[in-house]
Image (cartoon, coloured by chain):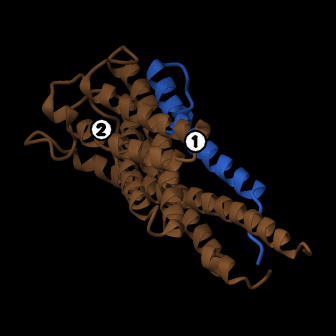
Chain colours: A brown, B blue
Amino acid sequence: MPNSPIRDKINPMEQRSPTLRNLAWLWFAIAVAVLVVGFREAIFLVPSDAAQGDVGRIFYYHVPIAMWSLLFPYLNFAASLAYLYWRNRDPLKALTADAFALASAEVAVVYTSITLITGSIWGRAAWGIWWAWDARLTSLLLLWLLYVSYLMLRRFSSTGQTQTLAAVLSVFAAVDVPIVYMSIRWWRTQHPAPVFFGGPDAGMDKSMLPAFVWNIIGWGIWGIFILLFRFALERRRQIADQDAALQAIEASLEIPQ
Amino acid sequence: MTWHSFFNMSTMENRHLLSAYATVLVIQAGYLARVAWQWHRTRAPRR
């Protein structure tokens, strides 16, 4: 069935794949190049922090990745809402939204895991302890647990409503994101005060800006790349499943009665 | 800072800096490798 209208409808990305592949390689190359510049700035060009010494350079990876880790849950939230809206109205669009929700949840877990680990490594050197149950660290740990739960639900649930349950969980999980963001503004915490939008004492020295900006751009481009790659993988899986189902239907129709 | 001091493990400060950067790169590269591996294992749609 090379020109099936059904397959064309479920797989419109197929015809664009060579262009998309070239674009993906270009995007990947740009991400790596920007991250190399960011690494060079953070390690070799920025002067050591006067108070913390070289361990303060963890900031240039920890903070940009932490900032991005609060964006991906919102993408998951938006895709989950889209899934819930379309699941009875347009199942093909709902499948696409569901693939995007899954991809953004995985990337959220990757970025949140890194934030927790690098923060802990920095805390041990700066505070003398690996962990403190303060509002920022605890709310971020909860966010991580919520998205790990989301992924485990999708992986192990055997009901026919897994995608709907996951989408509803995602809506609740997104509530934690503003709590994480505001935690260092609402409560006194062991975690350092906010760098941006944190009042008159917020901000950073001009000498720190290039390393910070290159890394926030680099990890953003990288995050979008892995998000879209994971989304494309999930779409490929969905299309492979649909292909198998269509083949089975076609085979049953070809059986002489 | 130089490459030599970046890989110098003699102080806790340097060990923690190196381990933080290595953690970031290993997790990100590991996740990308996992997605790429699954991409190659998933059958491409028929044309």
Q: Residue furthest right?
A: A256
- Which residue: 74% across, 85% down? A3
Which class describes the residues within 10 Å of circle 1: few (<14), some (14-19), or many (20+)? few
Q: In the rendered image, is residue A37 in sight?
A: no
Asked whether the residues under marks 2 and 1 belong to the same chain, the reply is yes
Percent x, y for residue A52? 31, 27
Residue on which disc 2 sits: A176
Percent x, y for residue A126? 34, 21
Whole-angstrom CA distance, mark 2 to mark 1, is 27 Å
Residue A60: image quadrant is top left
Residue type, label 1: Thr
Residue A170: image quadrant is top left
Label 1 marks which chain's residue?
Answer: A
Q: Is residue A2 left or right of residue B17?
A: right
| Up-down relation of residue A1 to residue A229 (above or below) | below
* The disc label shown at residue A159, or none: 1
Between A41 and A200, the one lying in front of the other is A200
Between A103 and A122, the one lying in front of the other is A103
Q: Which SS class for mark 2? A: helix
- Which residue: 24% across, 37% down? A179
* The disc label shown at residue A174, or none: none
Q: Residue furthest front?
A: A257
Percent x, y for residue B1? 45, 38
Label 2 marks which chain's residue?
Answer: A
Quarter of the rendering occupied by the N terminus of chain A: bottom right
Residue type, label 2: Asp
- Which residue: 31% across, 30% down? A139
Q: Is residue A178 left or right of residue A188?
A: right
Quarter of the rendering occupied by the C terminus of chain A: bottom right
